[in-house]
Image (cartoon, rainbow, N blue to C red):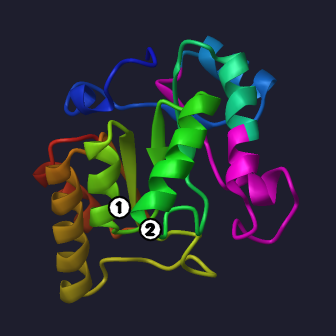
Amino acid sequence: MKSSESLKHYKNVRKLVSITAYDYFSARYAARAEVDFILVGDSLGCVIKGEKDTKNVTIDEIAYHTRCARNGAPDILLASDLPINSYKTKDDALKNSEILKKAGADLVKLEGYCREIIECLIRNGFRVIGHLGYTAQHFDAPRVFGKTKESSQKIIEEAESLDSIGIECLILECVVDDVASEITRRINIPT
Protein backbone atom coordinates (compact mmCIF):
# COMPACT_ATOMS: atom_id res chain seq x y z
CA MET A 1 0.00 0.00 0.00
CA LYS A 2 1.39 3.40 -0.94
CA SER A 3 2.13 5.82 1.87
CA SER A 4 -0.64 8.16 0.72
CA GLU A 5 -3.37 5.50 0.80
CA SER A 6 -5.87 5.34 3.63
CA LEU A 7 -6.42 2.14 5.59
CA LYS A 8 -10.09 3.12 5.98
CA HIS A 9 -10.85 2.13 2.41
CA TYR A 10 -9.99 -1.52 3.01
CA LYS A 11 -12.86 -2.29 5.39
CA ASN A 12 -14.71 -5.26 3.86
CA VAL A 13 -12.37 -5.33 0.85
CA ARG A 14 -9.73 -7.75 2.07
CA LYS A 15 -7.66 -8.54 5.12
CA LEU A 16 -4.73 -6.24 5.67
CA VAL A 17 -1.23 -7.53 6.26
CA SER A 18 1.11 -5.64 8.54
CA ILE A 19 4.48 -6.41 10.03
CA THR A 20 6.63 -4.72 12.61
CA ALA A 21 10.06 -3.64 11.39
CA TYR A 22 12.73 -1.60 13.11
CA ASP A 23 15.48 -1.37 10.50
CA TYR A 24 16.36 -0.90 6.86
CA PHE A 25 16.62 -4.59 5.92
CA SER A 26 13.47 -5.73 7.70
CA ALA A 27 11.45 -2.91 6.14
CA ARG A 28 12.98 -3.54 2.73
CA TYR A 29 12.00 -7.21 2.78
CA ALA A 30 8.54 -6.40 4.15
CA ALA A 31 8.00 -3.99 1.25
CA ARG A 32 9.20 -6.61 -1.22
CA ALA A 33 6.71 -9.05 0.30
CA GLU A 34 4.05 -6.40 -0.41
CA VAL A 35 2.68 -6.06 3.11
CA ASP A 36 0.05 -3.36 3.38
CA PHE A 37 1.82 -1.37 6.05
CA ILE A 38 4.78 -1.48 8.40
CA LEU A 39 4.69 -0.60 12.08
CA VAL A 40 7.70 0.70 13.96
CA GLY A 41 6.57 -0.44 17.38
CA ASP A 42 7.64 0.39 20.88
CA SER A 43 8.19 -3.36 21.17
CA LEU A 44 11.70 -2.43 20.07
CA GLY A 45 12.33 -2.03 23.80
CA CYS A 46 12.15 -5.82 24.14
CA VAL A 47 13.21 -6.95 20.67
CA ILE A 48 16.07 -4.55 19.96
CA LYS A 49 17.13 -3.22 23.36
CA GLY A 50 16.60 -6.47 25.28
CA GLU A 51 14.54 -4.88 28.03
CA LYS A 52 11.72 -6.59 29.94
CA ASP A 53 9.02 -4.24 28.63
CA THR A 54 8.35 -1.23 26.41
CA LYS A 55 8.26 1.38 29.15
CA ASN A 56 11.76 2.81 28.61
CA VAL A 57 11.43 3.44 24.88
CA THR A 58 11.86 7.11 23.97
CA ILE A 59 10.48 9.20 21.15
CA ASP A 60 14.03 9.64 19.83
CA GLU A 61 14.46 5.87 19.61
CA ILE A 62 11.16 5.46 17.75
CA ALA A 63 12.16 8.31 15.41
CA TYR A 64 15.56 6.71 14.74
CA HIS A 65 14.00 3.35 13.87
CA THR A 66 11.30 5.07 11.82
CA ARG A 67 14.03 6.69 9.69
CA CYS A 68 15.74 3.32 9.29
CA ALA A 69 12.50 1.60 8.24
CA ARG A 70 11.55 4.45 5.90
CA ASN A 71 14.93 4.13 4.17
CA GLY A 72 14.21 0.45 3.57
CA ALA A 73 10.64 1.02 2.41
CA PRO A 74 10.44 4.51 0.91
CA ASP A 75 6.99 4.11 -0.67
CA ILE A 76 5.03 1.87 1.69
CA LEU A 77 2.59 3.03 4.35
CA LEU A 78 4.53 3.36 7.60
CA ALA A 79 3.08 3.75 11.11
CA SER A 80 5.05 4.52 14.25
CA ASP A 81 4.13 4.07 17.90
CA LEU A 82 4.00 7.02 20.22
CA PRO A 83 5.84 5.55 23.22
CA ILE A 84 4.62 5.77 26.80
CA ASN A 85 4.45 9.28 28.26
CA SER A 86 4.88 10.88 24.83
CA TYR A 87 1.19 11.86 24.53
CA LYS A 88 0.18 12.76 28.08
CA THR A 89 -1.00 16.18 26.88
CA LYS A 90 -2.21 17.49 23.53
CA ASP A 91 0.96 19.56 23.19
CA ASP A 92 3.15 16.51 23.87
CA ALA A 93 1.16 14.46 21.35
CA LEU A 94 1.44 17.12 18.66
CA LYS A 95 5.16 17.73 19.22
CA ASN A 96 6.04 14.03 19.27
CA SER A 97 3.80 13.14 16.32
CA GLU A 98 5.56 15.85 14.33
CA ILE A 99 8.93 14.27 15.25
CA LEU A 100 7.71 10.91 13.94
CA LYS A 101 6.23 12.47 10.80
CA LYS A 102 9.55 14.19 10.04
CA ALA A 103 11.29 10.83 10.56
CA GLY A 104 9.05 9.27 7.89
CA ALA A 105 5.88 8.04 9.62
CA ASP A 106 2.62 8.35 7.70
CA LEU A 107 0.55 7.43 10.75
CA VAL A 108 1.00 7.41 14.50
CA LYS A 109 -0.39 4.74 16.84
CA LEU A 110 -1.58 5.46 20.36
CA GLU A 111 -2.47 2.91 23.01
CA GLY A 112 -5.69 3.08 24.99
CA TYR A 113 -8.79 5.21 24.87
CA CYS A 114 -7.56 8.80 24.69
CA ARG A 115 -10.24 10.45 22.58
CA GLU A 116 -9.30 14.09 23.23
CA ILE A 117 -5.65 13.51 22.31
CA ILE A 118 -6.61 11.62 19.14
CA GLU A 119 -9.15 14.29 18.15
CA CYS A 120 -6.45 16.92 18.54
CA LEU A 121 -4.03 14.97 16.37
CA ILE A 122 -6.59 14.37 13.62
CA ARG A 123 -7.72 18.01 13.71
CA ASN A 124 -4.06 18.97 13.16
CA GLY A 125 -3.63 16.71 10.13
CA PHE A 126 -2.13 13.58 11.67
CA ARG A 127 -3.32 10.14 10.63
CA VAL A 128 -3.95 7.84 13.59
CA ILE A 129 -4.23 4.14 14.38
CA GLY A 130 -6.06 3.27 17.60
CA HIS A 131 -5.22 0.39 19.95
CA LEU A 132 -7.66 -1.02 22.51
CA GLY A 133 -7.64 -4.05 24.79
CA TYR A 134 -4.30 -5.12 26.16
CA THR A 135 -1.79 -2.30 25.86
CA ALA A 136 1.73 -3.02 27.05
CA GLN A 137 2.25 0.62 28.00
CA HIS A 138 -0.50 0.37 30.62
CA PHE A 139 -0.43 -3.23 31.89
CA ASP A 140 2.45 -5.33 33.15
CA ALA A 141 1.05 -8.65 31.91
CA PRO A 142 -1.39 -9.57 29.14
CA ARG A 143 -5.00 -10.02 30.14
CA VAL A 144 -8.17 -10.69 28.20
CA PHE A 145 -10.67 -7.86 27.68
CA GLY A 146 -14.42 -8.13 27.17
CA LYS A 147 -15.08 -11.12 29.41
CA THR A 148 -17.92 -9.44 31.30
CA LYS A 149 -20.97 -7.66 29.96
CA GLU A 150 -19.73 -4.35 31.40
CA SER A 151 -16.21 -4.63 30.02
CA SER A 152 -17.42 -5.79 26.60
CA GLN A 153 -19.87 -2.87 26.40
CA LYS A 154 -17.12 -0.44 27.42
CA ILE A 155 -14.66 -1.56 24.75
CA ILE A 156 -17.40 -1.57 22.07
CA GLU A 157 -18.33 2.00 23.00
CA GLU A 158 -14.69 3.08 22.98
CA ALA A 159 -14.16 1.52 19.54
CA GLU A 160 -17.25 3.23 18.13
CA SER A 161 -16.13 6.53 19.63
CA LEU A 162 -12.64 6.31 18.10
CA ASP A 163 -14.13 5.32 14.74
CA SER A 164 -16.44 8.34 14.83
CA ILE A 165 -13.55 10.80 15.22
CA GLY A 166 -11.63 9.50 12.22
CA ILE A 167 -8.92 6.99 13.11
CA GLU A 168 -7.83 4.89 10.12
CA CYS A 169 -7.86 1.47 11.73
CA LEU A 170 -8.09 -0.10 15.17
CA ILE A 171 -5.90 -2.72 16.77
CA LEU A 172 -7.78 -5.00 19.16
CA GLU A 173 -5.36 -6.95 21.34
CA CYS A 174 -6.41 -9.71 23.73
CA VAL A 175 -10.11 -8.97 23.20
CA VAL A 176 -12.62 -11.83 23.46
CA ASP A 177 -13.35 -13.17 19.95
CA ASP A 178 -17.09 -12.45 20.06
CA VAL A 179 -16.51 -8.89 21.24
CA ALA A 180 -13.80 -8.26 18.64
CA SER A 181 -16.14 -9.61 15.94
CA GLU A 182 -18.94 -7.35 17.16
CA ILE A 183 -16.63 -4.33 17.06
CA THR A 184 -15.51 -5.26 13.56
CA ARG A 185 -19.16 -5.44 12.43
CA ARG A 186 -20.11 -2.12 14.05
CA ILE A 187 -17.30 0.20 13.01
CA ASN A 188 -16.45 1.53 9.57
CA ILE A 189 -12.70 0.92 9.62
CA PRO A 190 -10.49 -2.17 9.54
CA THR A 191 -9.69 -3.93 12.82
> Disc 2 and disc 1: Cα gap in Å?
7 Å
Residue 6: percent from the left, percent from the top?
31, 26
Query: Is residue 95 at all visible to an observer of this figure?
Result: yes
Type of the residue with mark 2: Thr
> SS class of the residue under badge 2?
loop
User: Which residue is tagged 1?
Assistant: 117
Disc assigned to residue 101: none
Answer whether residue 56 is magenta in the image.
Answer: yes
Which residue does the image show at 19% across and 32% down from the upper left? 12
* Magenta stretch in the rendered image: 35-63
> Left or right: where does residue 53 sit relative to residue 32?
right
Residue 103: percent from the left, percent from the top?
64, 31
The residue nearer to you, when weighing 40 against 143, is 40
Residue 171: percent from the left, percent from the top?
40, 53
The residue nearer to you, when weighing 45 against 92, is 92
> Left or right: where does residue 7 sit relative to residue 28?
left
Q: Which mark's residue is nearer the viewer, 2 or 1?
A: 2
Vertical order, 161 against 189 (above or below) = below
The numbered mark, 2 or 1, whose residue comes first in the sequence reads 2
Which residue does the image show at 72% across and 58% down from the upper left? 58
Quarter in which the N terminus is drawn: top left
Circles 2, 1 touching at the beta carbon (< 8 Å): yes
Disc assigned to residue 89: 2
Residue 164: percent from the left, percent from the top?
14, 52
> Left or right: where does residue 128 sit relative to residue 62?
left
> SS class of the residue under badge 1?
helix
